[in-house]
Image: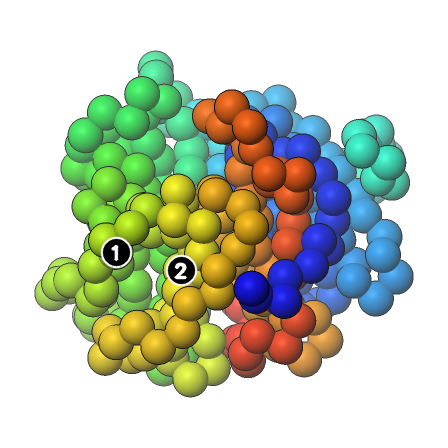
Amino acid sequence: MTAVEVAVPARAALGEGPTWDTRARRLIWVDVLGSRVHTYDPASGRRTVMTTEQHVGAAKPRAGGGLVVNLRDGVGLYGPAGSDGSTTAGPEGATGAAGGAFRWLHREPVPGRRANDAAVAPDGSLWCGTMRYDEAPGGGTLSRITPDGTVRPILDDVSVSNGTGWSPDGRRVYYVDSPTRRIDVFDIGDDRLPVGRRPFATVEEGFPDGLTVDADGCVWVALWDGGAVRRYTPDGALDRVLDLPVRRPTACAFGGADLTDLYITTARTGLTAPHPMSGSLLVVPGAGKGLPQPEFAG
């Protein structure tokens, strides 16, 4: 059994999107269906929770402070904590999180559709995914949004847009549309957009969900209904499996002062008898070596 620990005990319906905020030295993650953004400082143990007014697919740090969030109706920006003087009480024993002023960067509500996973590219843009609540095939999208609010469609026939991550040199991007049971890879063209989509790895048990790329260029992916995290080498070969006690891990990211601890978000939604760890933020200390993640440039 993998040496997995509970970093933050929680009952998140759909924990997702762990991201290490290098400047603040904390982990950011969300409960999509609970409309909450969580932070966790492993050095002090301090936790915060901020409630959003809509389901939140992802939250990432901004270069100017605050967060960029992928919400049900579009992409929004929160200012630095406390910039509007407000606070949001945190559930589950966590400290209340100061909520900065909010504004929409791009608002595009579509009935029956919500935000899902998102990732910041090396150039500081946000690649944000959507999906239908009923997971209808082709009902989701993947788009690139820049700090001035310009949106460029990347894929318009996605079912469940999930993990996105770049190779260490930024020349390749990996992407998951979960029902395909594949991780795909693209090359990055001169216009910073992906070209040459092709299969990178296929999952035969469970569904690929969120992913991260480590310092060796290997791809780690959480398997929804697969109870594991897998690591693939840059040529697509499976070389490590971390078995987990929970059935629905959702995403993974390296964090901690030296980026060697693998944090894993988990879900309880849809399970009649979830494991006690389901919904918590898990960690595998010393699992590997991650890469610093870029901040949204806005």
* Residue type (three-letter) at the residue carrying disc 2: Val
Position of the N terminus, as image quadrant, is bottom right
Side (left or right) of 283 relative to 233: right
Q: Nearer the viewer, residue 90 or 70?
A: 90
* Residue type (three-letter) at the residue carrying disc 1: Val
Kind of element beneath mark 2: strand
Give the residue displayed 30% in from the left and 73% down from the top.
Answer: 238
Which comes before the other along the chain, label 1 or label 2? 1
Side (left or right) of 181 relative to 88: left
Give the residue displayed 24% in from the left and 41% down from the top.
Answer: 179
Residue 263: x %, y % from top left: 60, 60
The reply to whether residue 31 is visible in this rendering is no
Residue 160: x %, y % from top left: 30, 38
Residue 228: x %, y % from top left: 45, 56
Q: Nearer the viewer, residue 46 or 279?
A: 279
Characterize the local packing of mark 1: few (<14), some (14-19) or many (20 or more) Cα atoms within 10 angstroms.
some
Side (left or right) of 110 relative to 279: left
Give the residue displayed 69% in from the left and 29% down from the top.
Answer: 51
Are circles 1 and 2 on residues that touch, CB within 8 Å? yes
Specify the label residue 158 is tagged with: none
Q: Nearer the viewer, residue 131 or 86?
A: 131
Residue bearing the label numbered 1: 203
Residue bearing the label numbered 2: 221
